[in-house]
Amino acid sequence: MSTTPADPDKLRFDKWLWAARFFKTRSVASAAIEGGHAHLNGARVKPAHPIRIDDRVDITRGQERLTVRVVALSDRRGPAPVAQTLYEETPESLARRATPTAAPVESGRRGGRPTKQDRRRIDRYRHGDGE
């Protein structure tokens, strides 16, 4: 698999994001760039903007925010281990992703009719401790 495009100075931003496996398709990568979810060197650019080695890429996917440095260019989408050699995540990004952003969602019943245990708690609250 070739890791460098035919003309190394002309690789499109959306094509690199797709080859590095940040997005499943080039059209999704283009939509993310146009929607402001992927920035190149801190600026909003168009999907066809050329990307170079040592550029900084900021990516937002849902709640996840990544900052990576471009290490290599590729215009082909390969296996994940090869795609991971195209970038290097910054230490700040790794630290930010390591800290939890939201409390875990509590599992269990939600809404609906109270259970027998819930009804007893409601009765104790309304009528006092033992009655």
Image (cartoon, helix red, strand yellow):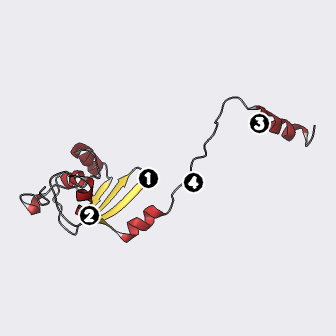
Q: Residue at x 26, y 63 (%)?
A: 87
**In this rendering, position of residue 107 left or right of residue 78:** right
**How much space separates mark 1 and mark 3, taking CA atoms?**
35 Å
Assign a secondary structure to mark 3. helix
Q: Position of residue 69 (x, y in %)?
A: 27, 67
Q: Name the residue type under label 1.
A: Gln
The reply to whether discs 1 and 3 touch (Cβ–Cβ < 8 Å) is no
Q: Circle 1 sits on which residue?
A: 63
N-terminal of the two: label 1 or label 4?
1
**How much space separates mark 2 and mark 1, taking CA atoms?**
20 Å
Q: Position of residue 84 (x, y in %)?
A: 27, 60
Quarter holding the N terminus?
bottom left
Assign a secondary structure to mark 4. loop
**How much space separates mark 1 and mark 4, taking CA atoms?**
13 Å
Q: Position of residue 27 (x, y in %)?
A: 23, 43
Q: Residues within 10 Å of mark 3 (few under 14, many from 20)?
A: few
Q: Circle 4 sits on which residue?
A: 103
User: Can the viewer see residue 28 in this picture?
Assistant: yes
N-terminal of the two: label 4 or label 3?
4
